[in-house]
Image (cartoon, coloured by chain):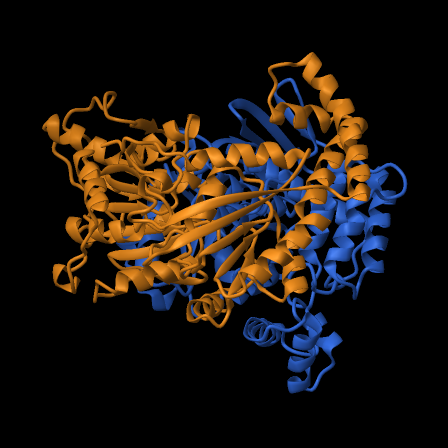
Chain colours: A orange, B blue
Amino acid sequence: MKLRFDRGTILLTGPPERPDLAGAPGVVWDARVGAHRTPAIRYPALKRWLVEGKIPFQDIAPPLRPAGADWSSVVDLRPYQEAALAAWELGHRRGVIALPTGSGKTRLALAALQRTCLSALCLVPTRVLVDQWLREIGTVHRGPVGCYGDGVRQLHPLTVATFESAYRHMAHLGDRFDLLIVDEVHHFGGGLRDEALEMAIAGTRLGLTATPPRGAAATRLDELVGPTLFELTVADLAGGFLASFDVITLHLDLSPEERTTYSGLRGVFQSVHGEFRRTAPGATWLDFTVHAARTPEGRRALAAWRQMGRLVTFTHAKRRALAALLERHRLSRVLIFTADNETAYAIARLHLVMPLTCDIGRRERAAVLEQFRLGHLRTLVSARVLNEGLDVPDADVAVIVGGTLGEREHVQRVGRLLRPSEGKRAMVYELVTRHTIEVGQARRRRQGLAARAPAQL
Amino acid sequence: MRPARPLSYSVTARQVVPHFLGEHDHPWLRMLLEEHARFIGRPRRELEARLRQPLPGETPPRKLELATQVLDRIQHSRPTAAVPPRQARALVFIEAARMPASRETVLGKVANSLGVTAADLNDALFADLPGERLVGAPSSPLSAAELALRSNLALVQALLFRATAVTVEIEGNTRLLVRHAKWRGLICTIAERSGTTAATLEISGPFALFRNTRLYGRALGELVPLLAWCPRFRLRAACDFEGRRLALQLGTGDPIFPAAAPRQYDSQLEERFARDFRRRAPHWDVLREPEPIAADNDTLIFPDFALQHRSDPTRRWLLEIVGFWTPDYLARKLEQYRKARIANLVLCIDERRNCADADLPPGALVVRFRRRLDPAAVLRVLG
C-alpha cells in the first residue's frame, strides 16, 4: 500500500496487505478515484494505526527539515515561558498556550522551532505580522526562511504564511511540514479557515493566543490544534513580567441633542426588540437579527440599533475628553482605540495624529511603527489593526474611545501597554457614555482582565 | 476573505431556489446606476452614505445589497491629491508631534514647505484611502440588465460556496469545463452517458467525502459562468446550509452572466483541418468537442473532433490530432487511448513525434501528417 498526499487529503493506493481498512482513522473509500482517502490531518493517526497493525506501507516523502547548524544562538526563555513549553511537551507537542499580549509568545515559538528541529509552517493573521515573524526568526536562525503572503511564494523548511495564503495554498503545501505554529489561534475553530489546518499532515501543532476561545470554538480548536495546555492572564503577570497598569473609566454624558436623537432611535429599536423578547424569551441576539431582517419594521429597528452605535462612537463629550487627555499626556506614547475606521480618521484629522488602519499599506505601517519607536510620532489611532499581534513599540497610555468586540479585544488592547520597563505604570482610559449601550459593553469587556490563577499546567 | 454576502433565496422541499434579479428589478437597478453615476468624481464615502439611505420606490433589501456590492467590485475608483497622501501624512503627523501648536499652524507650516495651500494639504492627507477615493465609472457602460446578470452570478456562486459536489449534464464545451475544474483541483468523473452528444459529469473536491469545504465550494462556483457557453446544461449541486443538505439546480437559460467567450480551437492546425474537411467532404458533419470518454477512474479523454456521415449514422469516427506534444505527454495520451479501447478512433500523428506502431491503441486508424493535416488522407482511411 502506498500513501500519497493529494490536495489536502491522504490517498491510500495499491492493494493493501490486509484489505480491511474499515478501522483505519478517518479512512473512507473514494469511488471517484478507486482508492481509500482520509483528511490530511488524520495522517499521524493513520500512520500509527498502520504501524501498530504491522501493515506494510510506503510512506509519503518526509518533509525536509531545517539544518541544525542554521540556529545561531540558543533561545532563552523566562520561567513562565519554560513552564508553558514544558506543558506543550507533556501534551505530546499538540495544544494551545495562552499568554497575555507582550509576554513573549513569539519567543516561545522560536524556542519550540529550535528545540524540535522540525520543518515548520508558522501561520499569522496579517502580512505585517509575516514581516515581524521573519525578523524574529532571523535573529536566531541564519538559514533561509520561506514566506507565503502578499504575492510572495517562497517555500523553505521554515516558512511563515498569512492565514489567507495558508487557506489558499494548503492543498499543495500540506505535506511539507511536521510542525504547525498558529499565532492568534483564536481565529480558528469556527470558520472557513479551519480547512487550512485540516489539509496539513503536521502531527505537531502549537497554537498561541492571549484569549483562548471557550465553548464550541474551543472544542473545535482541540480537534485542529489541541487542548489549551497552559494559560496565564494579564493579572497573573502584571507588576512582574508585565508592566503594572491602572484603568480609569471616564463616564460621559450625551449632549441634549445627542440624547434626543439617541432616545428616538432607542424607541424605534425597543418597539421591535421588546416585543421579540416577550415572544421569545430565551432567544439570542442572532435570533433577533434573523427575525428582524424579515420585516420592514424589523429592518428599521436594526438600522436604528446601528445608528445608536454610530452615535456613541465619538460624541461631543468624547471629543472634549480626548482632547484633554492628549494634552495631558503630550509627552507620553499614546495609543487611541476606536470602534471603527471612520472614527479613527475623524480623530486623525482633528488632532493630526497618525491613523494605523487596514487601509494603510504595509510599508507605510512599518515606517509609522519605526517613527513611533524613535519617538518622532507620539500618538497612534486605530480601530483594529493594533488589537493583536503587532509588536508595537513601548506605549504607556491607551485611550479606549470605543470598541465593539468585547473581552478579547479589550485584553489585546490593554496588552499593548504592558511591555515592562523600569518604574513603568501604564494608564488605560476608557470613555464610556452613560445610559447607552456602551455601559454594558464596557462591563463585559473588563471581565477579560481578571486573573485565571492558578495557571494550568 | 470577503465578508458573508447577503443572499436572496428561499428553501422549498429541500431545494435552494435563488431569487434571480430579472426585468421586474430593472427599474430600481436603473435608479442604483443613476445614483452611482451621480457620484462619479466624488469620494466613495459620500456614495456609501447615500446608499445607506433607501432608494425611491420599493427595493428588495438583500438584492439591493448584492447589486451594490457587485457594482462596487466592477467600478474603478482613483485617488487624486495635490501632494502624495503618504508623503503628506509623514510630514504633517511628525510635525504635529514635534511642535505644540494648533492644527492650522501645523498644516500651514507643512503646506508652505511643499508649496501648496493648507486646504489642499488637508484634502491630501487621506485621499488614497478607500472611502476618500473618487468614484469612477465602470470600465464599460453598464445596463440594468447586465448588472442583474452579474448579481445573479454572484448569488449563485455564493450559494455554491456551500456545495460539496455538482452533477452537470452538459452538451458541448465539456473540455473547457473539465480543464477548468482540474486546474482548480477538483475531481471530475463521468457518471453516465445520456444520448450521443451529452455527458454527465460529477465534479467535487477531494474533501467532498468528509464535508463541505469553502475552498472547493469556491472552485465549483467558478464553473458556473463557463456553463453559459454550453448549448445545453443542467447542474445539480449538493449544498450544506449549516448542517442541512439542500439541492441547488441550474439549467440552460438561467439568467447568469457568462464568462468571456472560450476559444473554439486549441490550435491553427485544428482550425484549418475543420475548415478544409468541411470543404472537401460536404456529406460529413465535423463536430468540435464531442462527448468525453472515460479512460480510467480519474481520467477523461476529449477527442478533438467527431466525424459523422450525414446519411449513415453508423459511420461515426472520433478524431484526435497528435500535434506538438512532448514525448512524455504523448506516451500518457496514447496510454489513455489504449485503456479507453475506443472502437472508432482515428489518430492523426505528426511524423516528427516518432511514434512506434506498437505504442498505438489497437484498432485505431492512423493518419501521419507533416505540418498540415490533409482531409483527403483522413477520408481515405475512413473508406
In which image quadrant can residue B57 be found?
top right
Q: Is residue A339 above or below residue B376?
A: above
Q: Position of residue B126 (x, y in %)?
A: 65, 66
Q: Position of residue B136 (x, y in %)?
A: 75, 64
Q: How many marks?
A: 0
Compare residues B87 and B236 and report the one nearer the observer.
B87
Is A362 left, or right, of A96 in this rendering? right
Q: Residue furthest right?
A: B57
Compare residues A300 and A437 and report the one nearer the observer.
A437
Is A410 left, or right, of A121 in this rendering? right
Q: Is residue B253 above or below residue A338?
A: above
Compare residues B221 and A274 and report the one nearer the observer.
A274
Q: Quadrant location of the C terminus of chain A?
A: top left
Q: Position of residue A78 (x, y in %)?
A: 21, 49
Residue at 41% over, 63% down: A152
Q: Is residue B116 above or below residue A252?
A: below
In which image quadrant can residue B321 be found?
bottom left
Q: Position of residue B2 (x, y in %)?
A: 57, 47
Q: Quadrant location of the N terminus of chain A?
A: top left
Q: Is residue B352 above or below residue B221?
A: below
Question: Can residue B215 be seen by looking at this rendering?
Answer: no
Residue at 25% over, 46% down: A179
Compare residues B347 and A175 and report the one nearer the observer.
A175
Question: Can residue A163 be seen by looking at this rendering?
Answer: yes
Is A247 left, or right, of B276 in this rendering? left
In which image quadrant can residue A45 be found?
top left
